[in-house]
Image: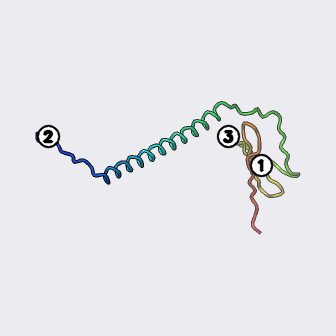
């Protein structure tokens, strides 16, 4: 025998069983991790390709009904939203619409405390 040869004793039956158990647990953990990564990639890819292929619907003619006496104070565009500020009997209200479809996106009322 030379000095570069190392002698590794054979593992006992208990050690061999422990090594087999550790290998099996590592295999399970690795497969679970790979499955989770695949699920995330599939979900991200689905969301990317689903939204990419669809064009927004054309708005066509849209009529927004306002309460009687409402006055438009201002209008503007913020990102993909159309923002309309209204004065309704002394109460300020902001209404937002999707700029592509002109569907209502939200309403915000400002009222004075009693």
Q: Secondary structure at mark 3?
A: loop
Q: Nearer the viewer, residue 8 or 32?
A: 8
The residue sitting at 64% across, 34% down in the picture is 50
Which badge, 1 or 3, comes first in the chain's sequence? Answer: 1
| Front label number (2 vs 1) | 2
Q: Is residue 107 above or below residue 49?
A: below
Locate residue 65, reporting x and y percent.
85, 46
Where is mark 3, residue-wise?
A: 80
Q: Seen in the image, is 96 located left or right of residue 45?
A: right
| Front label number (1 vs 3) | 3
Locate residue 82, reporting x and y percent.
72, 42
Give the CA separation, mark 2 to mark 1. 89 Å
Q: Pointer 3 and pointer 2: residues touching (CB < 8 Å)?
A: no
| Front label number (3 vs 2) | 2
Q: Residue furthest left?
A: 2
Q: Is residue 16 above or below residue 100?
A: below
- Residue 4 badge: 2
Q: Label 3: how many residues lie within 10 Å, few (<14), some (14-19) or many (20+)?
A: few
- Residue 73 badge: 1
């Amino acid at each position: 025998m030379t000095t570069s040869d190392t002698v590794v004793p054979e593992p006992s039956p208990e050690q061999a069983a422990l090594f087999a158990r550790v290998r099996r647990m590592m295999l399970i953990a690795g497969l679970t991790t790979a499955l989770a990564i695949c699920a995330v990639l599939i979900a991200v890819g689905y969301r990317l390709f689903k939204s990419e292929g669809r064009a927004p619907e054309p708005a066509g003619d849209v009529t927004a009904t306002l309460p009687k006496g409402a006055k438009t104070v201002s209008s503007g565009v913020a990102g993909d939203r159309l923002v309309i500020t209204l004065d309704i009997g002394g109460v300020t209200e902001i209404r937002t619409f999707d700029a592509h479809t002109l569907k209502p996106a939200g309403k915000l009322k400002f009222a004075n405390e009693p």
